[in-house]
Amino acid sequence: MKIRSYMLIGLCLSLLLSILPFSGEITHAVTPASGISFTQGVQTTVLDNGLTVLTKEVHTAPVVSVQVWYKVGSRNEGPGINGISHQLEHLMFKGTTDRPVQFGRLFSALGSQFNAFTSYDETAYYGTVQRDKLDALLMLESDRMKNALINPEQLTSEKRVVISELQGYENSPNYRLDRAVMRAAFPNRAYGLPVGGTKADVEKFTLEQVRNYYQTYYSPENATLVVTGDFDTKALLKVVQDTFGKLPQGAKIPTVTASATAAVTQKKPILLKQPGSAALLQAVYPLPDIKHPDVPAIDVMDAILTGGRSSRLYQAVVESGLASSVNGGAAELIEPGWYEINATAAPGQELSKIDQVIQETLAKLQQQPVTAEELERAKTQMQASFVLGNQDITSQASQLGYNQTTAGDYHFIEKYLAAIAKVTPADIQRVAKTYLNPAKKTIGFFEPTQADGKPGTSSAGSGRTVENFSPGKPVDPAELAKYLPKATSVTDSSTQTLPQQFTLNNGLQVLLLPDPSLPVINLSGQIDAGNEFDSNQKAGLANLTANNLINGTQTKDALTLAKTLEDRGASLDFAANREGVNISAQGLSTNLPILVQTLADVLQNATFPPDQLELSRQRALTSVKYQLDDPRGLGRRVFQQAIYPENHPFHSFPTIESLKNITRDDLLRFYKEHYRPDTTTITLVGDFNPVEVKALLNQAFGKWSATGKPPVINLPSVPFRQTLTRLNPVIPGKAEAVTYLGYNGISRKDPRYYAALVLNQILGGDTLSSRLGTEIRDRLGLTYGIYSGFAAGINPGPFLIQMQTAPRDAQKAIASTIALLQQLREQGVTEAEFNTAKRSITNSYPVDLANPSEVATIILNNAVLGLSPAEIREFPNRIQAVSMPQIQQAIKELIKPDNLVIVTAGPGDTLPSGG
């Protein structure tokens, strides 16, 4: 079951820009066959004021997750106030009457990995911290449930931030098509309106409207508090009673009467002809609400249609070459929802033909029963995803909160799983006939008016922006501290188990970390065969090679390989990056032998079938066109090419021409030269016996060999620009601008690395608590998201600052950012900032270590970068060892506002005046 989630206050780039269709997926439970229940041990407590409290002790790691789910979302909004739930969510971080400070700074100081989202039926806030910060999180969440400080200045600022966010979504043709289709499918229902709101409504929100909405819906009886992790329930409930228990009940919650779904009158596709990169299709069919008995069968039907490479729609439109991608999902909500199918046309293919083939595929599902093989595969995929999606306590808490809020009972998942197990071929045929009725379908086509795969015009110049701005005074952490609930700040990673490390006779490096807490396997790996080996003439070769590994071996074709994994609910993916090809695989622990054997087969015996190569090439061409039409993608490309000279591998990006130049012989040569055991590292974290796994790996990889020495690259020097350089690639039809500022940075082994991490935490490590976030987002309201970072790898990568702004605000935001960097160079940082940043980094580290998949990635990265296996344990100590003189020296050497490369991609009105 998939739902649309609208994530805000992002912790990383992927979360900063995630109001997109089906951007989040909350799974329901674990497979009964695993013998694990994610509802076992859950205790329900209802306070006198009506607050429902769900607690679940999980003692696998010293962390806790606190979540507050409010039963209010866009479903509750009336005419003229579309997006007010989302607007209020932003304001909930602006402080309370007792703590008139940005709550993001308080959460960051605690080391919390926090976030919030607004959806159709709910708004939720969550944070995950070390267990000793639990009381502090409870105090902060209880404070803002009733005491949010919503004043005129904050509303004005955050309305501007929200509009910046919405304009960012408008950059996406997928978003624009979705708005048009949903508006037509649900003309008289709130579900037909965008959860984030519209610019027209947001601009008109009044202080009285927002305050009334807050007072109406933010109250104990309309909320569920969920706490999972390492705590004692009895002690926890006492703190909950002392914090949330003292809050008064609110006014009576207005009843939302579900509007009837209007009959579809749109016979022809909705047609959008706008600037874009690829032709898109979206079809929507009405569905019942989440409690309807047909929901489990609908979800199994969806898995048969769109669940992986072996699914019916993937085979019908992607493997046939009609589409570069297809996906779908059911939105099952408090009120009747919908089933959605999305497809991106392959270059030169007609949307009408894709629609025809999709309809034929659905008709076949209605006319003939599915096979026992398909049904079993779909059920297994769903069951395995429940286990794999709930490995960390944050996901487990979200599971409980979603079911309690939307279905009205966290036990809902148990009934749901039991019903999935009973779904029959006849059930699939019946729900397909009932709900995939073409007469009830609303469909939309997006046809791009600019799809040549080339960017728009670009202007360049040197010099400073016209305006000069003075940044506000940095937030004093000492002032912040008086609003922070008491909590200890000791991070002890000395008990972290170190991975077992060994090397096979052929040079393949292996790191193993047994973890029997759940019956799952997380495999991460890397091969030294990434984009660094691409030439400009054949840029994209490394990525095409990686993408085609799974397309056939000497004994298995692409479909057989897909079924081998998907029959077991397992996954295996490859992705070429700046340095190396990443391997990521997950599955239930019983399927470890199959995962390892499949990985070994494709790494040693890939055949690169010509037909699959051409399909992969078409998808790559679509990807390039998309990137050149996306301000983020085009901006990053132009930014990096401005920093690195043409003979540097980081300058190379795929183009239409370079992708067309690549032959199958090129892939075979690249595969033979770069895919070697002595340049491969594999990490396994999960439920396994190390002795058995060593034998398995030796058997699977022991005969893999390579001749000669591995290829190496000698990187040219990267000089700084002597003057500030500005580039402005123009993309017609965009509503938002994306800006990158920076220059070449440092490598991971640079002795200044740990000081740079602390410095960056102060500068732009967090959108809400950093200097950049405080100034550009919070004080000036110019951006939805701004952050900075050092992309430190084996070789030096860029230091960059990224932000999205309204086009008219781009130059002011750039000037303010430069002024802040100059202030940092001239004044340095305070002792309080320095200490707070170190605590924030070290306090959040145990949360990373509580997620098995994250642990696998950390172990792998340390190994690939040539660090000791003990780095996973020593990292907090290295951060704590950073001194103030080291920070000041890092500022002097690493912050260079006079040498910036500045790239702003977006519509033409982002260009600087006079420059």
Image (spheres, rainbow, N blue to C red):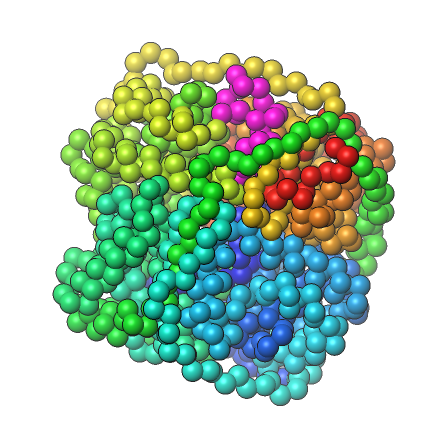
Position of 226 with respect to 755 (left or right) is left
Residue 509 appears anywhere in the view: no
The secondary structure that most of the magenta stretch takes on is helix
Image coordinates of residue 452 in percent, x first then y, are 44, 37
Which residue is depicted at the point 70% across and 62% down?
159
Image coordinates of residue 216 in percent, x first then y, are 65, 81
Q: Is residue 215 above or below residue 522?
A: below
Of the 4 image quadrants, the one containing the N terminus is: bottom left
Of the 4 image quadrants, the one containing the C terminus is: top right
Position of 118 with respect to 518 (left or right) is right
Q: Is residue 656 above or below residue 786?
A: above
Q: Residue furthest bottom?
A: 252
Which residue is depicted at the point 60% across and 64% down?
198
From the viewer's side, name the closer residue of 238 and 561: 561
Specify whether residue 846 is painted magenta.
no
Q: Over which residues does the magenta segment extend?
A: 633-652
Image coordinates of residue 782 in percent, x first then y, are 72, 51
Position of 408 with respect to 291 (left or right) is right
Image coordinates of residue 660 in percent, x first then y, are 35, 28
Which residue is depicted at the point 44% across and 47% down?
448
Splitting the image into 4 quarters, where does residue 788 fall?
top right
Splitting the image into 4 quarters, where does residue 624 fall?
top left
From the viewer's side, name the closer residue of 182 and 4: 182
Q: Residue furthest top?
A: 708
Specify whether residue 642 is painted magenta.
yes
From the viewer's side, name the closer residue of 457 and 197: 457
Residue 158 appears anywhere in the view: yes
Which residue is depicted at the point 27% across and 50% down?
317
From the viewer's side, name the closer residue of 689 and 703: 703
